[in-house]
Amino acid sequence: MKIFKTVPWLQRRYSAFSADTIFSEENVKKTITNFAKMKPLVQQSKLPVKKAAVLIPLCVINDKVSLLYTLRAANLKSHRGQVSFPGGMEDAGDKSVVETALRETQEELGIGPELVEVWGKGNIVTNHVASVMPVVGVLKISNLQKDLSVNPGEVKEVFTVPLEVLCDPQHVRHTQFRANYSLPVYTGGKRKIWGLTAIITHLFLRAMLSREEYNPSVKFVPPLKASSRNYGFL
């Protein structure tokens, strides 16, 4: 009988995404240290005055360490129908950005602060509306249908994407902008992940994983210069 052995690099890859590895004390400290030092993909000369926070929710679903995303409800004033992390604008009563992220998560998903193990926070990421602080936390849930109480006024849908899928080069694309930069797009989940949520996802994965596990090709390709010749059809 022929015995098949696991290819070493494949075995290492599965090990890198295991719960034991991801949730180890050493990895948690390394991730938050790296995440706080991460520079934004798009530099802004001035930070927006308004402040917001999002939770990057790690969870284990079907034995896979995954990230949880929401699809925003269609009735919301901003970013309606877009994929995002749980989160929102800072309230006057919030004592910290962590409190903002946890409060918004409870409002959107019905998950109380006692069910979130907070790792720490990253570095500010901006859009045209606010300065957004990403907070990393592990959700103490195992079943989306049973453990969540989704607020339909804010969230239309909840889904998760395993880390190994997010890191698969076949599922990482990019959008190129005229201002000489490109941003990642993730296509391996139920919904396409793009925009600010994709930026935060990318920075978090870069902070947590080695280049061997996550090394997407997000490059800017200079546009071709227009030829001086005048082409036409006769």
Image (cartoon, rainbow, N blue to C red):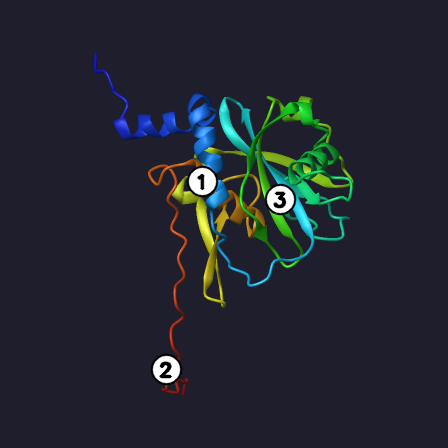
Q: Nearer the N terminus, badge 1 or badge 2?
A: 1
Give the foreground label among 3 and 1.
1
Spot the residue most to the top. Answer: 1
Three-letter amino acid code of the residue under disc 2: Ser
Q: Which residue is mark 2?
A: 227
| Crowdedness near tag 1: few (<14), some (14–19) or many (≥20) residues, C-alpha within 10 Å | some
Spot the residue most to the left. Answer: 2
Q: Which residue is mark 3?
A: 84
| Crowdedness near tag 3: few (<14), some (14–19) or many (≥20) residues, C-alpha within 10 Å | many
Mark 1 secondary-structure assignment: helix
Report the Cα–Cα distance between label 3 and label 2. Answer: 42 Å
Instruction: Judge from the rendering whether residue 224 lies leftward or rightward of residue 145; answer left or right.
Output: left
Three-letter amino acid code of the residue under disc 3: Ser
- The spot of residue 153 in percent (x, y) is 78, 40
- The spot of residue 156 in percent (x, y) is 71, 40
- The spot of residue 132 in percent (x, y) is 62, 48
Instruction: Judge from the rendering whether residue 211 lies leftward or rightward of residue 175; answer left or right.
Output: left
Report the Cα–Cα distance between label 3 and label 1. Answer: 22 Å
Q: Residue at x 36, y 87 (%)?
A: 229
